[in-house]
Amino acid sequence: MVVQYWGVRGSVAVPGPETVRYGGNTACVSVDLGELILILDMGTGAIPLGKYLLGSHKRIVAAFSHLHLDHIRGFPMFAPLYDEECAITLIGYDTGANDWFPTDMLDGVHFPANYLNIPCSIAKTPSSLLPGALGEHGRLSVLPVNHPGGALAFKVESGSQVLVHVPDNELVPGTASYRSLVEFARGADLLSHDAQYAESEYREKAGWGHSSWQRACGLALEASVNRLTLFHHDPDHDDEALDDIQRLSTQMFSPQTCVVAYEGLRIDLGVTGDTYP
């Protein structure tokens, strides 16, 4: 299982000279399972991912943690949509009333392209069938987490390897939601978690649906995960601010490995030891 980060920002994309090292695209993570690639959220990071996938002939499956724009905005510009040789399976997001699919964005009004004219092959899988969406390549499961309007944490299991990815979540230790997530992530090879704020910033933004990097480290320690990636960076955190978080979080999570996510970060869960480009 190879996990790669294509967009690591939360809320809004922030391209520019002050974010060039960690990147400015919003949430998009791919999980390479061999012949199948799973995409978790399609913020603006889905645009470079789409270009990378052209010609790969991999089966593409996409799932969404929730419907905020920073997690879906890249879908209409995902290059494989416009390639007749590509096949994409979209997993519905349960809104409580029905399943939402990102093809709803392609109506000729919210985006110029119309879903009916898209040349690729698109299959839609109901959210109720999500556990079997990866077939023989693995198992995908979700857990509701603490975020305004609702959101999901993902667990991807393939063979003995386990990834838990929690894009948007406000950690409140001692709550039922927190305890459920500790068990959901227990012993994972890699936990990737929302770390939008420093704890000093979080105190002013409690209830906004995001966590501090300190709380993400605390969760990782309590769940006894092997590795931690801090994700969903605040758009106001420039490269220097994220360098500081990298240094401090490494001290807090030691001796395990903690990495502040950046565009291009690639983690092979099948490789022993820590090998980050």
Image: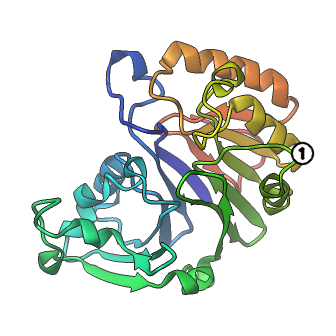
Q: Amino acid at mark 1?
A: Glu
Look at the image and tell me in which quarter the N terminus lies: bottom right
Up-down relation of residue 114 to residue 243 (above or below): below
Residue at image position (88%, 47%) is 174
- The residue sitting at 73% across, 34% down in the picture is 258
Left or right of 187, for residue 156: left
Q: Position of residue 199 (x, y in %)?
A: 71, 24
Question: Which residue is disc 1 drawn over?
Answer: 222
Pick whichever, 231 or 110, lies toward us.
110
Residue 229: % across, % down: 66, 40
Task: Out of 12 and 238, give the one closest to the viewer.
Answer: 12
| Total marks placed | 1
> Which of 166/176 is in front?
176
Q: Residue at x 85, y 60 (%)?
A: 183
> Residue 100's x, y, as percent?
39, 74
Residue at position x 57%, y 21% in the image: 242
Q: Left or right of 83: which side holds 243?
A: right
In the displayed structure image, the side of residue 200 where residue 180 appears, left or right: right
Question: What quarter of the picture does the C terminus occupy?
Answer: top right
Q: Is residue 31 left or right of residue 189?
A: left
User: Is label 1 in a helix, a strand or a loop?
Assistant: helix
